[in-house]
Image: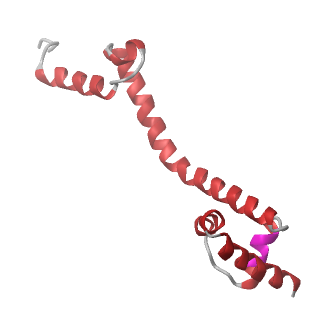
Amino acid sequence: MSRAVDGLKRKNHRKKILKQAKGYWGRRHSNYKTAKDAVTKGLFYAYRDRRDRKGDFRRLWIIRINAACRAEDISYSRFIAGMVKAGIIINRKALASLAVEDIQAFKAVVSRVKAALEA
């Protein structure tokens, strides 16, 4: 049996890969062989980085909370320990949002944390 080199399925598959490689630099957007490798790698990175994004945001929130805590003369680790002692359950995303958008509310949380640490 002969091998199909110009069949519809083959053309559609190649067209799909080249369409995904649109905007790539050099041969990677026009040459099927290199485009296939580039698209495969790109899809792998996208899959991996969708999971990494969660950790990136957590790190960002911690940095923001730490900066706001330092302005109130308390370290991040002491602040979190004090929140546990005070029984305050607010996640880091909400705390970072408070630290950036509502400074007075964050200061109120910090004062309760400091009171819990002293007690």
Q: Quadrant of the C terminus?
A: bottom right
Residue depicted at 24% across the width and 28% down the height: 16
Residue 61 colored in magenta in the image: no
Q: Position of residue 1 (x, y in %)?
A: 11, 14
Closer to the camera in the image, 40 or 54:
54
Picture quadrant where residue 82 is located:
bottom right
Q: Residue at x 34, y 25 (%)?
A: 21
Q: How many marks?
A: 0
Residue beneath the point at 76% across and 83% down: 112
Q: Is residue 24 above or below residue 54?
A: above
Instruction: Read off the magenta span.
Output: 78-83
Where's residue 108, x and y in %?
71, 79
Q: Main secondary structure of the magenta part?
A: helix
Q: Is residue 29 above or below residue 58?
A: above
68 and 40: which is toward the camera: 68
Q: Position of residue 18 (x, y in %)?
A: 29, 22
**Residue farthest along the bottom direction in this orientation:** 119
Query: Dividing the picture into quarters, in which one does residue 71 lie?
Result: bottom right
Name which quarter of the figure residue 103 lies in.
Answer: bottom right
Q: How is the image coloured?
A: secondary structure
Q: Is 79 part of what is drawn in magenta?
A: yes
Please indicate whether residue 13 sits to the left or right of residue 75 in the image: left
Q: Position of residue 49 (x, y in %)?
A: 51, 43
Q: Residue at x 67, y 81 (%)?
A: 88
Query: Which of 16/23 is in front?
Result: 23
